[in-house]
Amino acid sequence: MDDSLWLLIIIGCSFALFIGWRFEKAERKEYLEQLKVQLELEERLSKAGIQDIDIMDGIEFEQYLVVIFKKLGILARKTKASSDFGADLILEGKERVVIQVKRYQKKVGIRAVQEVNSARDYYRAHEAWVITNNFFTTSAIKLAESTNVKLIDRYGLVDLILNSNYTSVEKEVR
């Protein structure tokens, strides 16, 4: 082989190694970014005390949400335990909101959306929400979208809790 062919082979191999190195560097950067997002999420979940909610019973979770809404300056009241017509909490303000509360170890299904949608009419509410410490099934999400029911999943709950902590600290400072 002549020198020019060897030179082309060396340049080709060097280029391939460089591309591989750049690709690996990009993958590493993406992995580190994903890891950072995951750590931030875990920190937010920890600050919110979501693990404590996971071991509450349903009644405790309802009462906990009453406190959270109070910290946010929203009047919340529990409905009676049985024959609640699909609502566990009612928020009173400019507009009435009925809430179905689900502290579950699995995803919340379509039934919760159906119940709170019915409760909206019964309690003459403007809005209907379902709040859970978990997530929602695809069918529950589809029905909620078509019936205008607001779904607050685990991450939305964390935001609600962190906002209430910020609000209560802000009130103490003033």
Image (cartoon, rainbow, N blue to C red):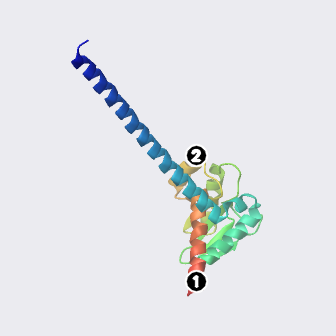
Residue name at image x 57 percent, y 74 percent: 166
Q: Camera-side residue: 62 or 99?
A: 62
- In this picture, residue 88 sits left or right of residue 169: right
Q: Camera-side residue: 158 or 102?
A: 158
The image quadrant of residue 56 is: bottom right
* Residue with the most extreme front position: 3
Residue name at image x 55 percent, y 52 percent: 38
Mark 1–mark 2 Cα distance, whole angstroms, equals: 40 Å
Residue 11 position within the rendered picture, expressed as x and y whole percent measured from the top left: 28, 27
Residue 170 position within the rendered picture, expressed as x and y whole percent measured from the top left: 56, 81
As drawn, 72 above or below 6: below
**Tag 1 near tag 2, CB within 8 Å:** no
Question: Disc 2 marks which residue?
Answer: 139
Image quadrant containing the N terminus:
top left
At label 1, the amino acid type is Lys
The image quadrant of residue 44 is: bottom right
Question: Disc 1 marks which residue?
Answer: 171
Residue name at image x 42 percent, y 41 percent: 25
Residue name at image x 71 percent, y 61 percent: 53
Reading the chain from its start, which is encountered first: label 1 or label 2? Answer: 2
Tell me if residue 83 can be seen. no
Crowd rating for badge 1 (residues with CA inside 10 Å; few <14, some 14–19, many 20+):
few
Instruction: Nearest to the eye among marks 1 and 2: give it.
Output: 1
Q: Camera-side residue: 77 or 22?
A: 22
| SS assignment at label 1 | helix
